[in-house]
Structure formats: structure tokens, C-alpha cells
């Protein structure tokens, strides 16, 4: 019997299954991936199209068009990224972060490293490609090129502020003052929320935070069974965006959405005990099984 791998969005409305063999796994640092996921890089896997199907909620998907004929699907309730069919190649590609089963494949390379955030150090020794792996342009995850790799021009920030924006550029946010902390979180909720190997969250003081554009387009989703776990996303493109969290008197910024260097790099890996089986932590940052004590 063919091995099946199962995935779902954060809220569970959209579910899918994909049949072996998974054909490649790679990290993408392009700006559209970073903003759409809110993660500092996306990790894609691909598989034969005929082994893939949505088992629930396909009608719940929003689709963000990044170029003619290319769409990035996302759950309209929670913003998780879903899978894209590439009929001409007979393939389907999607985010590894939402697959709930252990996977037999491992990341093979980094692509679009030219768009990598400056504060991320790649320590895993994998090959790094400035854009696509040479020869792969025809069957790569959708969206680049020919769309502008670097997305819309970010909006100007107020003096003394740093900020970020969504992939379509309709939502932008900024903050003043020094950030509080920044963590890579490997919990299963963060992996599903960001559709990525892990979330990288920047916490900033609430008083200095504001949406500078498109706040009316921002939708929040709170996980019902969690005390405070939530996400915010742009309802025009599905990108994860910053979210106010009054309980911690702060705002949580998905670091992949930043247009500026926050002046801080991740301080630790948290919930490292929950990390995906296919992702190895290669850097020297402190690791906590759950939260720092
Ligand atoms: Zn969902
Ligand atoms: Zn990408
Ligand atoms: Zn948007």
C-alpha cells in the first residue's frame, strides 16, 4: 500500500493527504514566501499530483495570485498556507510545516538566499542558491519569477520606527522602541500557523505598535483550546501579519514579514522538543524543550 502523509491548516478546516514518494524538500528565503508564511523561510515538499487530494475544506481556501496562472492557496479562517497543483509538471507542492506525520525526506538546499533576512545565519551546511536551483525553474514552488521577487515596495515608516508588511502590500505595521525578545518556536501550533519548520516571533511593546496600512483587512484567529495562541493575517493575500496581544502588553510580529532589520536576532529555540522530525537545529542558540525557565 502506498504511504500517505497527512496535513492540515492550524484551525483544521482544510485537510489534505499526499501519497509517497515525496520528491524534494527545500528551504525558500524569497520575500513572497517569507511574507506569506510569516516565517524566515518556507520549507517546500513536492509530490506527484495524482497522489494528492484535499480531504476537507478545499472550498475554504483563499488564493493569492502571484503571477498569471500561479496562486498561493491559504485557509481563509486561519491563514495557513495550503498546497498548489502544478498540472503541467504533474506535481503538487506544499509547506512541510503543516504535514502532521513524520517524513522520510530531509531538506536538500536553500534557495533565494539573495532575499534571506540579514540576521539569519545558515549553519546547516546545505547548498545555497541565490535564486532557483539551476534547471529547476520549470517545476519550482509557484510564484517566482516572473513576479517581482521582492514583492511590493514596502511603505515608508514613521521616523524612528521599523516594521513589516504582507505579501500583497495592503497591510503594513510598524513599531517604535526596542524589541523585547525574539524566539524560534518549534511547537506544532507555530509550525501549522506559519506553515514552516518553526515560527520566528519578535515581541515588541504594545504602546509603540500600530498598523500603518490596511488594519481593516487584518483578521485574527484564536485557537479555541489554547489560552492565548492566535494568529493574524491579511484577508487579501493570506500573509501572517503582526498581532496585538494585550495579555502580554505587546505585539507579536512574524519575523518573516519584517521589511527592516529589527536590530535583534533570535535568542533561543523554544519548544525544541516538539520540532519536526525532518528539521535539524544546526546553529548554536540555546535550546529549551519548552519555554525558557
Ligand atoms: Zn484553517
Ligand atoms: Zn519562495
Ligand atoms: Zn496582503
Image (cartoon, rainbow, N blue to C red):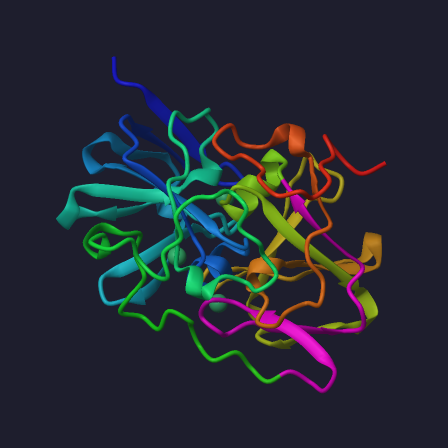
The quadrant the N terminus occupies is top left
Provide the residue span drawn in magenta: 157-185
Q: Quadrant of residue 176?
A: bottom right
Farthest top residue? 1
Residue at the (49%, 59%) spot, across then down: 34
Percent x, y of residue 115: 45, 65
Residue 15 on the magenta span: no
Q: Quadrant of residue 255?
A: bottom right
Q: Quadrant of residue 43?
A: top left
Please give left or right for residue 71 compared with residue 90 in the image.
right
89 vs 168, nearest the viewer: 89
Residue at the (39%, 40%) spot, across then down: 57
230 vs 148, nearest the viewer: 148
Percent x, y of residue 293: 86, 36
Above or below, comparing residue 203 to residue 169 in the picture? above
Quarter of the rendered structure image containing ligand 2:
bottom left
Residue at the (21%, 42%) spot, across then down: 91
Is residue 30 visible to us here? no
Please give left or right for residue 62 compared with residue 266 in the image.
left
Is residue 169 visible to us here? yes
Farthest left residue? 88
Residue at the (54%, 53%) spot, across then down: 39
Percent x, y of residue 200: 63, 51
Percent x, y of residue 60: 41, 47
Residue 171 on the magenta span: yes
Amino acid at each position: 500500500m502506498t504511504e500517505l502523509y497527512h496535513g492540515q491548516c492550524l484551525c483544521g478546516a482544510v485537510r489534505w493527504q499526499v501519497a509517497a514518494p515525496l520528491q524534494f524538500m527545500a528551504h525558500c528565503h524569497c520575500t513572497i514566501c517569507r511574507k506569506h508564511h510569516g516565517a524566515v523561510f518556507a520549507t517546500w515538499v513536492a509530490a506527484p499530483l495524482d497522489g494528492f487530494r484535499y480531504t476537507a475544506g478545499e472550498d475554504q481556501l483563499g488564493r493569492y495570485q502571484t503571477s498569471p496562472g500561479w496562486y498561493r492557496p491559504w485557509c481563509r479562517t486561519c491563514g495557513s498556507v495550503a498546497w498548489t497543483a502544478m498540472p503541467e509538471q504533474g506535481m503538487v507542492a506544499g509547506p512541510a510545516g503543516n504535514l502532521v506525520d513524520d517524513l522520510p525526506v530531509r531538506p536538500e538546499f536553500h534557495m533565494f538566499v539573495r532575499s534571506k533576512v540579514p540576521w539569519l545565519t545558515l549553519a546547516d551546511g546545505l547548498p545555497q542558491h541565490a535564486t532557483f536551483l539551476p534547471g529547476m525553474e520549470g517545476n519550482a514552488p509557484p510564484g517566482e519569477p516572473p513576479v517581482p521577487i521582492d514583492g511590493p515596495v514596502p511603505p515608508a515608516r514613521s521616523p524612528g520606527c521599523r516594521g513589516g508588511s504582507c505579501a500583497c502590500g495592503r497591510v503594513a505595521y510598524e513599531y517604535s522602541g526596542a524589541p523585547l525578545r525574539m524566539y524560534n518556536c518549534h511547537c506544532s501550533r507555530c509550525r501549522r500557523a506559519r506553515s514552516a519548520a518553526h515560527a520566528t516571533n519578535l515581541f515588541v511593546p504594545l504602546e509603540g505598535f500600530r498598523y500603518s496600512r490596511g488594519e481593516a483587512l487584518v483578521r485574527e484567529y484564536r485557537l479555541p483550546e489554547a489560552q492565548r495562541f492566535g494568529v493574524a493575517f491579511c484577508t487579501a493575500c493570506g500573509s501572517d501579519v503582526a498581532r496585538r496581544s494585550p495579555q502580554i502588553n505587546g505585539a507579536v510580529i512574524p519575523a518573516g514579514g519584517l521589511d527592516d532589520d529589527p536590530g535583534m536576532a533570535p535568542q533561543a529555540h523554544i519548544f525544541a522538543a516538539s520540532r519536526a522530525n525532518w528539521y535539524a537545529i544546526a546553529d548554536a542558540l540555546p535550546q529549551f524543550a519548552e519555554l525558557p525557565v
